[in-house]
Structures are given as structure tokens and as C-alpha cells.
Amino acid sequence: MGRAAPILTVLCGIFVLWYLAAIWMNATWVYDQASRSNTSVTLAQVIPQTMAQERPLLPPPHQVAQVLWDGVTGQAVTSKRSLVYHGYVTLRGTMMGFALGTLLGVALAMAIVRFRVMELSVMPWAIISQTIPIVALAPMILTVSNQIGIDNREVPKAIIAAYLSFFPVLVSMIKGLRSPDQMQLDLLSTYGASEPQTFFKLRLPASLPYFFASLKVAVAAALVGTIIGELPTGAVEGLGARMLIGSQFGEPLIMWAALFAAAILAGGLILIVGWIERAARARMGVPA
Amino acid sequence: MTWLVGAVVFWLAAWAMNVRLAASRFGATRAGRITVAALFGVTLLVLWEGLVRGFAVPTVILPGPSVIGPKIVSSLPILWGDFVQTVIRGALSGFAIGAVAAFVTAIAIDRSPFLQKGLLPVGNFVSALPIVGLAPVLVMWFGFDWQSKAAVVVVMVFFPLLVNMVAGLQATDRLHRDLMETYSASYTQRLLKLRLPAAMPFVFNGLKIAATLALIGAIVAEFFGSPIMGMGFRISTEVGKLALDMVWATIAVAAMAGSVLYGLIALIESRVTFWHPSQRSKSQ
């Protein structure tokens, strides 16, 4: 309970600020309407009107929750209007990219730890690759894969997601595979352990805590990558596409609902990874 | 065919060279490390060029470096205009505002452990969210020009910076704090002489993360509406025209901007946190 109270206070503060901002930002529209119809409104009349506009500048929390709820339960989950459907499309892209990025990160880390030449030549470029804003590449990856004949929209999204998520895994795995200290390595060499044996019995288990810690970052990054990958696809499906539709057709509520759906998805993914991490640690006998 | 074979031969030769360099004593020096990395980079470019020419890939799919290079040189004025619009006006101003805001907030809540306990988990969670999604909302609020891009950048960099800053301010040794106690230092003195310097490694860690985020935010925000200049605008329109050489030229500029920004922050870091073990081991 000691941790819940401060967090709840902060969250309540955010809600209060949000409502105040919503009243302040949406009031302009109410005043405009009133002056057009030559009526005057008092503050007490303005406030309810700022709470339920069709195109609010900033929808108040309950309106967002309402739209989100409608988007999830209002129609069959296979409907194109359903947020569950779009969330599923985004989730699929995220998972593909996440798997791809994690594999790539682990494989590169193993090569870099094993071969010094890999470390010297690849590592600097891996760092530079992350300073390149991948979003710049996103529209091009999409067009190019289209022209090569990959009609599947998942592939380019997954590439972008993988590009963003491999790096945290790479960095953590290098650290993890190097974490066994000299004494442990010496012990294995007194056993006459071969290199693969050292790897599988010492380095790999030692790296697991680092691995799971990096997965949380990687899964969040993969989601961001997928959403970015959905933006320039011409707005067909996925949460990113919903945001673009909301933006282009002037429907802020669609945009906000998609935004919060994405946030909930991110939260869920992080929780699941955290849960897997705890389960794995418990099985390996790491004290909590 | 000759291009393909040539590229592969060059690749093998460069790799063999790198293997020898890495094993030699030269490979342990700073110059050696740079040589190996640079050689690898050049190899990538040669392979790219060789594959593009060898397979006769049309330029609308993937132009080779020999096409992109001249394009960069011939369209410098446009690229410079985009650079100023996106990086300097959008990303850097937002980066500065976000950094100052995070700094001020961290100091403001420094005296209240209650608020810190509440803000840290929330901030950690928010930094993991796809905040990029706010871009269309902010473009709607602040219009198409650079102000909306800066706003996106502010929101994106604020939370990672805040979390790092708050964590940094808590990262002092018991021993150091006791020493300050014996000097009977005031709160401000402690903050300025001990805790802020001690927080710097964390702050720079956050700044490095934020530098990449800033460029991403500024470019993505341009996908949702922009004046007729800017890197995001250029990329999305040139892709539509299938002028991929221009797209790659813009990407090259973005990559350079990102690397230079990162490098600058790393340089300042090595000056400010020269005392930190990670920096000391480098200079030896």
C-alpha cells in the first residue's frame, strides 16, 4: 500500500489537470457558437458543453473512455470499426518484429562476444544505426517492399519494429554474456570444458536476467515501430492507421481512442513480459 | 556479373584485413578501432553498389551510393532548408524546451519523496508508451509549422529525461552525503556541489536517448501535416514520386544529423563527467 498512495495521487492530479485543460481548450468553441447565435453563456453553462462535443480539441477522459468502450464492445471484433480488430493487426506486426529483432539481437551479441573482429567492425555501426531516425526509412521500406511484390503489409512493419527492438537486446546480451567472472571461467577450464559447453552451461544462463530486462524495452520499442510503420501505409488497418484516419478526417475522438488503445496494448505487453521474467527467474532459482 | 564478383571479392578481402587488424596490436589502439569500423562501413557501401549494379536493380527500388552521392551534392540547398526546418527549428528547440522542463520538474519535486514515488513509476510507464501517437493531436493544436513539431518532441523527450534526472539526483553515496553533513552544507550547496554533479551521468544517459527520440518525433509529426519543407515532408512526397535517390539523400542527412547530435552529447559528457569510471577507463 505504501507505493500505491503516491501513484494514485499523481494519477488523480493528472486527471484533474486533464479536465481543467479540456474545459479551457473546448470553451473557445462554445463561446464561438454562442456569439454566432447572439446568445451569451455563463460559465456554468459552458462547462457541461465542453464535456460532450463531437469534435473537441481535447476530449475529457470520460469521453475518451466512452469511445474506447464503444470501439471495443460496440460491434463484432472482426468489424473494421472495432478497435479489437485494429489492435490485433498491430499486435501481430509487433510480435513479428519483436521476434525478429530479438533473434537478430541475440545472434549478433553471440557473434560479437565470440569474435573480436565482429565487435570492432559491427558494434560502432549498430550504435550509429540507432541514431538514424528509422521513421525516415519507413515510407521507403513500404514502397520498396510493395514494388518487389510483397503485398503482405506485415513484412515492412515487422522490419521497422525489428530495427527498433534489436538494439536494446543486443546491448544487454553483450553485457550478459560477458557477465561471468574470471573465477567461474577458470573453474570451467579446469573441468576441461569445451567452448560450446562453456557457452551453454555458463554464459547463456548468466545472461538470462539481462535478456529479460532488455525484452521489456524491446517490446515497447517494437510497438512504437509497428505504429510508425502503419502511418504511411495509406491508412488501412492497425492502430497507427486509425490515428491517421482520425487526423485526416478531423475526427479527434477516433484518434484519441486509438492512442489509448495503443497505450493499453503497450502496458499489457510490458506486464506480460514482466510476468514471464518473474516466472523464469523463479524457475532458475534467482532470489526475488 | 563483374560488379557482383568484384563486390564479393572486396568484401572478403576487407573482412580478412579486418580479422588481421583486430588480432594485431594496432587493433587495440584507438586508431585501429576506427580503421576497422571505417573499413566495415566502406565494405557495406561497396557491397550495396555491387549488388545494385550486379542485379541491375532499378533506381525506383534501390539506388546505389553512386547515384545518391551526386544527388546530395546537387540538391544541397533543398536539403539544407529541410534540415533547418526539421532539425534546428523542430527537433532542437523541442529538445531544449523538453530538457529544461524535465530539469526544472525534477528539481521541483526533489524535496518531496511522496511526489517522486508517485511520478517515477508513472514516468517510467509513460516513457514506454507510443507517445509518437500524440503527433496528430499536437499538429491539430499547434498548426502545421515547426511549433507543432517542437511540441511533439517536448512530450517525447520529457518523461525519459525526467526519470533519468530524478534517478540521478538520488544517486549519491552515503559517504558523500555524510561528508556534506559534516561541512553543515545547506540544501542549495548540497544540490550544486554534490548531487547535481553526481546526477550528470544519468542526465547524459537520458539526453542520449532523447536525442534520437527528438529526431523521430520531428519527422513523424511532419507526416501529419507540414509546410512544404522539412525532412518528413520531403521523404513522404518524394516516395510518392518514386524519386528514391532524393529520399536516400534526405535519409543520409537525417543519419548524419542524428549521429552528430549524439556525438556532440557524448563529447560534452566526456568533458562534464570526466571523473566517472566509464570515462576514465576510456582515456587510458
Image (cartoon, coloured by chain):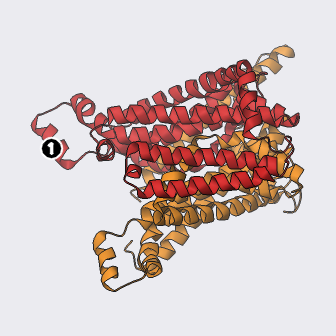
Tell me the quarter of the image containing the C terminus of chain A.
Answer: bottom left
The chain letter under disc 1 is: B
Viewed as shown, does residue B191 lie left or right of A229?
left
Q: Position of residue A62 (x, y in %)?
A: 69, 45
Q: Which chain is red?
A: B
Nearest the eye: B33 or B248? B33
Query: Which residue lies at the image location 23% right of the left edge and 47% below the top edge?
Result: B173
In the visual, does A273 lie left or right of B117?
Answer: right
Asked whether, in this view, residue A27 is left or right of residue B198, the answer is right
Q: Amino acid at mark 1?
A: Asp
Residue B144, visible in the rendered structure: no
Q: Who's the residue at 82% across and 59% down the image?
A: A85
Image quadrant assignment for residue B78? top right
Q: Give the colour in which the image draws chain A.
A: orange
The foreground one among A156 and A73 is A156
Residue furthest toward the bottom? A191
Given residues B114 and A46, the one toward you in this image is B114
Quadrant location, the N terminus of chain A: bottom left
